Each structure stands twice: as structure tokens, then as C-alpha cells.
Image (cartoon, rainbow, N blue to C red):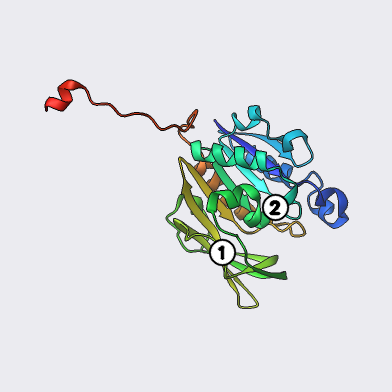
């Protein structure tokens, strides 16, 4: 079984009626509910206002893949929790950063750059699959059309992805690297751009399929208990060789 934790600020769904109408149970539960349809995935959720943001040592130590959605309250995430997430990824946990998490504390620790980009209000988007052989693109069409999504544009201040799976084109002419993969330590990181809170992108089956694929791709075979430097010794017999 792949143990997934879906983290969400869970503020917009409470304060904004438009967002609540789209995600009445919160973005975290919307994502969690379609993941629960997968037989080999178990899901729990965590939100910003829970003690330790819902990411206690017990929760993190029982998470294979952490999905993170944030937007307006990145600064309220404690540095201690961000450090724990960062270390857990280095030990092998998968990390999926969604939409505005390009500036989330754990993501920035993992990529080491500012995560800055261009943005503007909603526009028509065509999400192109540019690496169809990648596991995250399995079962995904040549492109997905999103009638309304917040525009993100280049330059996007990230390290060159180890693998680039999706690129977005917007009606305003902008392009954006929307599906980026990195290896960090023993863990895998995937950034996926669609998912502004006022758009129903997480209800779209092909978007759900991408996130499900990403969970399977990022799931570790093993997570290390700790990261250590050990002394390498050579036996007298080996020295004589």
C-alpha cells in the first residue's frame, strides 16, 4: 500500500463562497477522495490550522507521498515543519507540489531557488504532454484543455527539471513548464501547475489521473530511518589483495 497524506491550507474554502461552491469539503478532500478509489493507496489529510499543521512526527513517519496545496499563507507554515518535510523527502518520501506551491517552504528547500514566475488572471489553457513515455503521463492525451485556469508564465525560477512531462500554453501566448520532476536525495519531487482554487481543475478526470500517476511514480520502495556518514573500513585480507 502507498500511504498518502494530502496537505491543504484549507482557508479559501472557509472564507470564500465561490471556492466553497467548487470544493465544499476542501481541496484536500477532493484530491483524497479520488485517490481513495485506487486499491493500493490509503489517504489521510492534514491542514494548516491543525496542531503542527497536521504533520506530526507520527503522520510524517507514516507517509510515503505527501501532496501539498497552498496559496496565500505559505509564511504561516513553521520552519520546523518545513525542515521535517525536507528531511523526510531526502530519506525517500515522495513530494507533489500543486499550483501555488511553487513558493511553499518545503518546495523551496527542495529546489534551492526562488520559485518566482509571471502570473495573471484566468485564461484558456492547453496542457501539452511533452514526455508521453513518462509514467506520470500514462493514459494522458496529447493535450488537455482547461477552459479557465490562472495563467503562470516564464521565466520560472526553478532548477532545470530532471524530467519535463507537461508544458502549458495559454491564449495570451505564454508558455510554462507545468509538470516538472526532480530527484532529491532518496526522494522524488513533482511540481504540477493546474489547480487554482476558483477553478474546478481537480474535478477533471485527466487531471486526477495525472496526480494519481504521480503518486505511483513518487512512491518509494524504501524510506531510510536516518541519513548518516559512516566510516568505511578495509579488512587486512582486502588490503593484502
Q: Nearer the viewer, residue 140 or 213?
A: 213
**Where residue 36 appears, x then y in whole percent?**
65, 37
**Where residue 104 appears, x then y in whole percent?**
66, 52
Q: Against 187, is 159 above or below? A: below
Q: Nearer the viewer, residue 35 or 63?
A: 63
Query: Which quadrant of the view contains residue 103?
Result: bottom right
Q: Nearer the viewer, mark 1 or mark 2?
A: 1
Taking the spot 73% from the left edge, 35% from the top edge, the residue there is 52
Task: Classify 10 Å Cα crowding around label 1: few (below 14), some (14-19), many (20 and above).
Answer: some
Q: Nearer the viewer, residue 221 or 109?
A: 109
Pick the quarter of the image with the N terminus.
top right
**130 with respect to 64 (left or right):** left
| Element under disc 2 | helix
- Which sits earlier in the primary sequence, circle 1 or circle 2? 1
Pick the quarter of the image with the C terminus.
top left
Q: Which mark is residue 157?
A: 1
Q: Is residue 138 visible?
A: no
Query: Which quadrant of the view contains residue 236?
Result: top left
**6 with respect to 41 (left or right):** right
Task: Classify 10 Å Cα crowding around label 2: few (below 14), some (14-19), many (20 and above).
Answer: some
Q: Residue furthest top?
A: 236
Taking the spot 86% from the left edge, 55% from the top edge, the residue there is 16
**Where residue 12 appears, x then y in whole percent?**
81, 52
| Element under disc 1 | loop
Q: Which residue is mark 2?
A: 203
Amino acid at each position: 500500500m502507498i500511504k498518502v497524506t494530502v496537505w491543504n491550507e484549507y482557508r479559501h474554502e472557509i472564507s470564500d463562497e465561490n471556492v466553497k461552491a467548487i470544493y465544499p469539503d476542501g481541496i484536500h478532500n477532493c484530491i483524497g477522495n479520488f485517490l481513495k478509489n485506487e486499491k493500493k493507496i490509503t489517504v489521510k489529510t492534514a491542514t494548516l490550522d491543525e496542531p503542527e499543521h497536521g504533520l506530526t512526527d507520527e503522520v510524517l513517519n507514516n507517509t510515503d507521498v505527501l501532496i501539498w496545496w497552498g496559496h496565500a499563507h505559505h509564511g504561516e507554515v513553521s520552519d520546523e515543519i518545513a525542515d521535517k518535510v525536507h528531511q523526510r523527502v531526502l530519506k525517500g518520501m515522495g513530494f507533489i507540489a500543486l499550483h501555488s506551491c511553487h513558493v511553499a517552504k518545503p518546495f523551496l528547500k527542495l529546489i534551492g531557488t526562488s520559485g518566482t514566475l509571471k502570473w495573471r488572471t484566468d485564461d484558456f489553457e492547453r496542457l501539452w504532454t511533452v514526455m508521453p513515455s513518462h509514467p506520470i503521463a500514462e493514459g494522458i492525451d496529447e493535450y488537455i484543455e482547461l477552459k479557465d485556469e490562472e495563467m503562470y508564465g516564464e521565466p520560472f525560477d526553478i532548477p532545470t527539471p530532471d524530467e519535463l512531462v507537461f508544458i502549458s500554453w495559454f491564449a495570451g501566448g505564454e508558455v510554462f513548464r507545468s509538470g516538472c520532476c526532480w530527484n532529491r536525495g532518496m526522494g522524488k519531487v513533482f511540481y504540477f501547475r493546474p489547480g487554482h482554487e476558483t477553478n474546478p481543475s481537480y474535478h477533471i478526470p485527466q487531471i486526477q489521473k495525472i496526480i494519481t500517476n504521480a503518486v505511483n511514480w513518487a512512491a518509494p520502495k524504501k524510506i531510510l530511518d536516518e541519513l548518516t556518514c559512516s566510516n568505511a573500513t578495509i579488512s587486512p585480507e582486502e588490503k593484502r589483495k
